[in-house]
Amino acid sequence: ARGSEKERGASRMNSQPQPLEDDSCMARYYRQPVMTRGICTMLVWIWMLGAVLYPDLDMRLSGCPAGILSLEIWRWFTSPFVAGGLIGVLIGVLVFGNIGGQFERTFGSLAFGYLFVLFNVLANVAFTLLVLLAAPLFPSMGLLSPMNCANGVWVSVLGFLVVYTQRLNTPHMSFWGLCNIPTKLYPWFLLLLFGLLGGSFLDNLCGIMVGYAFHFGYLTRLLPSEQRFQAWEAAPRLTWITQAPGHLTYTGSLWNAAGAGEDGGGGLG
């Protein structure tokens, strides 16, 4: 009898309506990992500052080789936050929020943030060097023009996409349900598509090459050790990140991912 009463009580509890998960915009925002959330927020805020107060802000932050020659080195670090318009902001937040969240959950917040900076700086340095080398050979192309700049999150997105697609075992990826693209060629398909639509080419190409360099292990010397990441997470000066909602501790998988192309690699967790 006692058993039947317990069963009836349990069935009554199970039949009660469960509280629905908060699906508001702010709840979705804070469900994103902290580093991905912060990068997307920076994209939006910089676009708003440029649209309302500083119309030339994008030009001051873009990775222009002409500016680098004037020792404006900060451009290598600020260029990923230049979206180039409202549509660029919306697409950038949507795409980066997806792929960035996957990598941050795999590597941890500080490791992903470090990799984001590393990918962008290396791609911007490569872009600057290529432009400086090519400018004397093709003077009519205006490669040192202030308008020829590397900017936007797509540089790092394509780099991360290379790492992601090289680990996938599925032979094809769908492009918005319109067509299927061979998985390993998906970043190159996007690069070609951007070029056909009039988008930047060389900076995105540099992002792809940095992704391959990471995949095949050429960047391992630039990665901090596991002990270094753990020390950063314990540092008091970084509590504004490590104690923020959505912070993910270092997983130790960053070193496993770097150079995975040498032994076949594995999938993103």
Image (cartoon, rainbow, N blue to C red):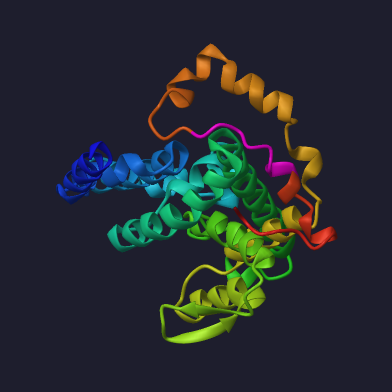
* Residue at the farthest right position: 262
Horizontally, is 72 left or right of 36 in the view? right
Q: Residue at x 73, y 53 (%)?
A: 214
Q: Is residue 47 magenta?
A: no
- Say which quarter of the image contains residue 262: bottom right
Q: Which residues are magenta?
A: 248-255
Q: Residue at x 46, y 32 (%)?
A: 247
**Is residue 193 in view from this perspective?**
yes
* On screen, residue 34 above or below 194: above
Q: Position of residue 41 (x, y in %)?
A: 35, 42
What type of secondary structure mainly makes up the magenta span?
loop
Quarter of the picture containing the N terminus is: top left
Q: Report the front residue among 51 and 107.
A: 107
**Is residue 67 in view from this perspective?**
no
Q: Report the front residue among 183 and 78.
A: 183
How many callouts does the rendering have?
0
- Say which quarter of the image contains residue 9: top left
Q: Position of residue 35 (x, y in %)?
A: 46, 38
* On screen, residue 41 above or below 195: above
* On screen, residue 165 above or below 49: below
Horizontally, is 234 left or right of 24 in the view? right
Q: Position of residue 244 (x, y in %)?
A: 40, 27
Q: Is residue 253 magenta?
A: yes
Q: Position of residue 169 (x, y in %)?
A: 66, 71
Q: Residue at x 37, y 54 (%)?
A: 93
* Residue at the farthest top position: 236
Q: Report the front residue among 174 and 80.
A: 174
Horizontally, is 85 left or right of 133 in the view? left
* Residue at the farthest bottom position: 179
Q: Residue at x 77, y 47 (%)?
A: 219
